[in-house]
Image (cartoon, helix red, strand yellow):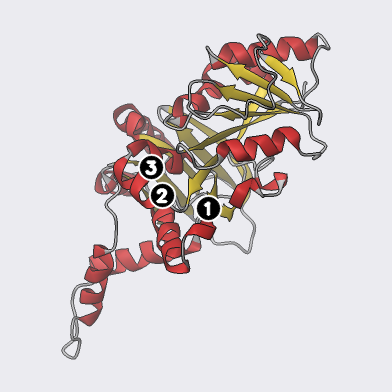
Amino acid sequence: MMTLIPATILTGFLGAGKTTLLNRILQEPHGYKIAVIENEFGQENIDNEILIQDSNEQIIEMNNGCICCTVRGDLIVALHTLIEKKNAGQLQFDRVVIETTGLANPGPVAQTFFVDEEVGLHYMLDAVVTVVDARHAMVQLSEHEEAQRQVGFADKILLSKTDLVDATELDALKKRLIRINPRATIAVSDFGKIAISEVLNLKGFNLNAILDLDPEFLATEEAHAHDEHEHECSEDCSHAHHEHHHDHHHSHHSDEIAAFVFKTTRPFNTEKLDYFLGGLVQVYGPRMLRYKGVLFMEHADRKVIFQGVHQIMGTDIGAKWSESEQKESKMVFIGKNLPKEIFIQGLEQCLV
């Protein structure tokens, strides 16, 4: 069995700082042999000083052992070419970073790894890393759905240009990013300065990876559920907490792309859940960016892990439930204008 080559998709809005990060990957002595695939239709190509001018060759080896491959056509073809050259002993690399253009939706790039058999034989998708420009992100998220998609797809968010905003602005941005995507971890990478370990080997797409959700998001979701269901106030209640909650809502940006979580300690009926999730993916797949969960199924002593990208969904058997842990299902859905009530009511009907 050959070891699969881990691939990282690097995305982010125009001018967010992807190129700075890539230049570091291609020049720094980090000891990895990385093939960087540059999708060449953005305004921001890798610094041309690095790439020898007028070179017709599409694959250029860097002094630090990395390779830069500019793609003018199909990504699948580029991935096949790299493997052929590696197998022929012409190139050496042990991981791949794919830069998508600033306006691109990373969805189709991620799907490549599940749809093309040849690609699936040689590569595994490690993670989607999104660079977010702290200075301009609030406006970009409001004006461009693609910016929201890039955040929604991320396993890891790297904040750049944080030196240009104050603590309050940064905090507001982080809260908004968490509402769009509570699965992604957030790190700061000003001027591309970040440890390579924060970009590679994240195992964000790995089904068995821990389902990390931002605790802040879970807390607000739970407060939310509490407020939706418990409106009977006692005599001495001044309704203050509802008003506070109401104000809290005003600061929310109504992003089209957002996340919600479903949690339950009751087991799922396997057949019902399979049928319901299959239907959801058929109807809402195009609007579902990423979804992931750890499931507590009836008659199962192991966790079931499920996740997907748009219409492509996979499940995997996870670790055994340990004696000490609470058996519960926890699912997160990130998508565009998803009908949260339909999802939640449907999931509740699949419980034993």
Q: Which residue position is annotated with label 3?
A: 148
Quadrant position of residue 97: top right
Q: Nearer the viewer, residue 201 or 164?
A: 164
Residue 136, numbered label: 2
Amino acid tagged 1: Lys
Residue at (19% x, 81% y) in the render: 239
Mark 3 or mark 1: which comes first in sequence?
Answer: 3
37 over 215 or under it: above or below: above
Residue 161, numbered label: 1
Q: Nearer the viewer, residue 48 or 147?
A: 48
Quadrant position of residue 226: bottom left
Amino acid tagged 3: Gln
Q: Is residue 264 visible?
A: no
Query: Disc 2 and disc 3: Cα gap in Å?
Result: 13 Å
Residues at discs 2 and 1 in contact (Cβ within 8 Å):
yes
Q: Nearer the viewer, residue 244 or 46?
A: 46
Residue 316, numbered label: none
Q: Is residue 126 left or right of residue 337?
A: right
Q: Is residue 297 left or right of residue 341?
A: right
| Residue 86, image x, y percentages | 77, 15
| Residue 176, image x, y percentages | 39, 56
Residue at (58% x, 55% y) in the render: 188
